[in-house]
Amino acid sequence: MAKNKLDWQTGDANDGRAPLSLENVHVAYNTRRGKVRAIRGVTLDLHAGESLALIGESGSGKSTLGLAIVRLLPDTAETAPGVITYRRNGREVDVLQLKPGELREFRWSECAMVFQAALNAFNPVLKVWAQALDTAKAHGWHDKDAVRRRLVELLEFVQLDPKRVIDAYPHELSGGMRQRVLIALSLLLNPQILILDEPTTALDIITQRTIIKLLRELKEDQGFTMIFISHDLAIAAELADRVATMYAGRVVELGASDDIFYRPRHPYTLGLIRAVPTVTGGFEQLFSIPGSPPDLVDLPKGCKFHPRCAFATERCKQEEPELEEVGPGHTAACWHWHEVEAELRRNPLHRGALNLTDVIAVDVEVA
Amino acid sequence: MTTTATTSEPFSSAQAASTPTPLRRITQNFYVRRIAKALFTIWIVITIIFFLIRLLPGNPVEQYIARLIETQGMDYENARSQAAALFAIDLDAPLWKQYFDYLVNLLQGNLGVSLTSPGTSVASIIARFLPWTLFSVGIGLILSFTVGILLGLMMAYRREGVLDHTLTIFASVVSSIPNYLIGILLVVWLGVQWKVLPIAQMRGTMSPGVTPSFSLAFLQDALFHAFLPITTYVLTTMGTWMLSMKGSTVGTLGEDFVTVARARGLKDWRITTAYVGRNAALPLFTQLTIAIGFVVGGSFLIETLFQYQGIGYVLSGAIAQRDYPVMQGVFLVITVSVILANLLADFLYGWLDPRIKVG
Ligand SMILES: Nc1ncnc2c1ncn2[C@@H]1O[C@H](COP(=O)(O)OP(=O)(O)O)[C@@H](O)[C@H]1O
Ligand code: SF4
Ligand SMILES: [Mg+2]
């Protein structure tokens, strides 16, 4: 693996098989109140070179799922049952069964995770360079010159001045710069998969745009495989090839970005889209999903969305629906997805979340 | 974004702040500022001592003059000139001149002459006894700080386990016992009851016939004699380090950068030392500066108890015999060494935490 070249193209060394497959993954946090069932059976294939967005309200389990994949959940979390299969070059492993040493090597060099724009993702007492070198060395890469060349290249890619950043301490950089350094660092070892958990939250709008532009380049020019977690539909729409809607620890709808944003079949996805404030279509009523997400310790029977769902019937209160095909490459977990389709025919979505991002982009250029 | 902004606006305030004048660069330098602060503190202490000894009613000079008149039947003039010689001051000069001479004397290391052993300069007494205190207190503090930090780190990693509970009880108990009591208990248990230590032979700073030299034999002998004071200093301070370090480590373990370091696949050892340990130990350096003062102050009781001839031992003797010049000298030296130790701790802190050198 030539780490000093910009060859982060994943390629298709898995004979078309997904680099990452989740099968019936469960996560529960043991708390004083009881078991918080944060992930309840997620099955999902991540395709090579695609960018998959996980959307859903806060608390729906997006971060938990991301952390489960790199096994960074706290000790109070239980991950069983479930299988997370990772494939590279024809070899496959169950991430959940990796031994500590193997897990350590898997992290960052196979699958890197960039966290929410937290202010202290970096050790405050070490320079950026030292932390990059730590990362390289931990994975057996000791050629300092090569690491430095690679880091310089990546910092330039994220539009930072390497001279200024490499020998800086984290506190000498702004929040947006730090987040870009973290993104650069996440590419250092040329991982096959990149997980980004709300990478732009807590950043100002200009910095957000820069980072989104960067991620788009990564996706379009470099063909990176990534999971992009966001509760901001506009950003998800801009970056995702496919979108998975999560609710109460399950994927309730999964499909191509256009299908999800223009032809949603799950009432929850529809609600999320209608809840996006509209800038252009001023006369459309702003809709918000009534109620709040269920208590994960004490979940309602049947479809977990039924207390908040306008389409709910008696059946929904008793039986929980599984994902079923609602179109080509499009699945939804709802007993009444046909009603949603009919409702959309009566009241079409005048604009998808996609339109909104264009507006923001224009705004920024004006300002 | 930020980089282009600064280059296109050469006169922005950010630019101005990042290129200060050479003079400002020096005065804003962390080390320069700390040294200046230390020197200033020393000057304040010196000045206070000057006024306490000379000007307050019932001050040592007057008392000494009164004692000379009383016990030796000297007349006032004679007594006064003898006192002036002993304290190395000219009582007839105007105050500013006295003060100035006093400063010059201090700079030359002239601290006056001992009352009880006439002819012995205070400076020579200090030069003889201070190294032993620096040796024992220094080793004691370094040992307790290092061991305390390592144990605290371990407790945090194994929190709520048997080891954590046992060590927490030990630390709480030991840090609440006064230092002289620990000293007495050491003598009673180790020396008298269990007889594991030859207490009588351990008295003093060296065995008879041994002379200071750079040899292993001398070091061994010095450590043998300093064993009890060092053990006492370690026991009295270690509990605090353990508990502080444990708390600090638990906090640090919850920091994002630790999670990110794990996500980066760093080895556990590297994370524990350079990411968790180093950051968790930082706040303890501020406490170290306070502890230095306490331990040096505490050496007064401990050295007397163990008959360890360091500066604290000299001080207790001087107080008992009202040897004011020696007392003055020792106070001065103790304060100065505490200030210097603080300076050292500050530098260490500045070296370990890049953030505090700003602003
Ligand atoms: N360490 C934890 N202990 C207990 N519950 C947790 C913990 N972390 C997250 N949760 C709970 O798990 C659920 C999912 O959280 P999370 O994965 O962070 O959601 P999201 O990222 O979608 O906002 C939430 O109900 C949250 O309260
Ligand atoms: S299954 Fe029923 S309650 Fe659940 S989303 Fe569909 S219609 Fe609503
Ligand atoms: Mg989250």
Image: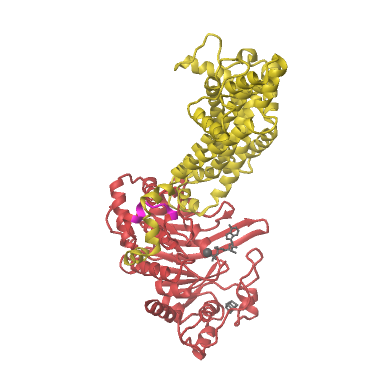
Image quarter where ligand 1 lies: bottom right
Display colour for chain B = yellow
Is A170 within the magenta?
yes
> Residue A150 placed where, x, y %?
30, 54
Residue A135, can we see it?
Answer: no
Q: Quadrant of residue A339?
A: bottom right
Query: A241 or B308, which lies in front?
Result: B308
Q: What residue do we see at 56% from left, 64% from top? A: A40
Q: What residue do we see at 33% from left, 44% from top? A: A142
Specify the segment rendered in magenta.
Answer: A164-171
Display colour for chain A = red
Query: A233 or A338, which lies in front?
Result: A233
> Residue B224 placed where, x, y %?
56, 18
> Residue B201 placed where, x, y %?
61, 12
Query: A281 or B147, which lies in front?
Result: B147
Is A144 within the magenta?
no
> Is the magenta region chiefly helix, strand or loop?
helix
> Residue A160 placed where, x, y %?
34, 61
- Total marks in image: 0
In the rendered structure, the answer to whether residue A30 lies left or right of residue B104 reads right
Q: In which quarter of the image is the C terminus of chain A?
A: bottom left
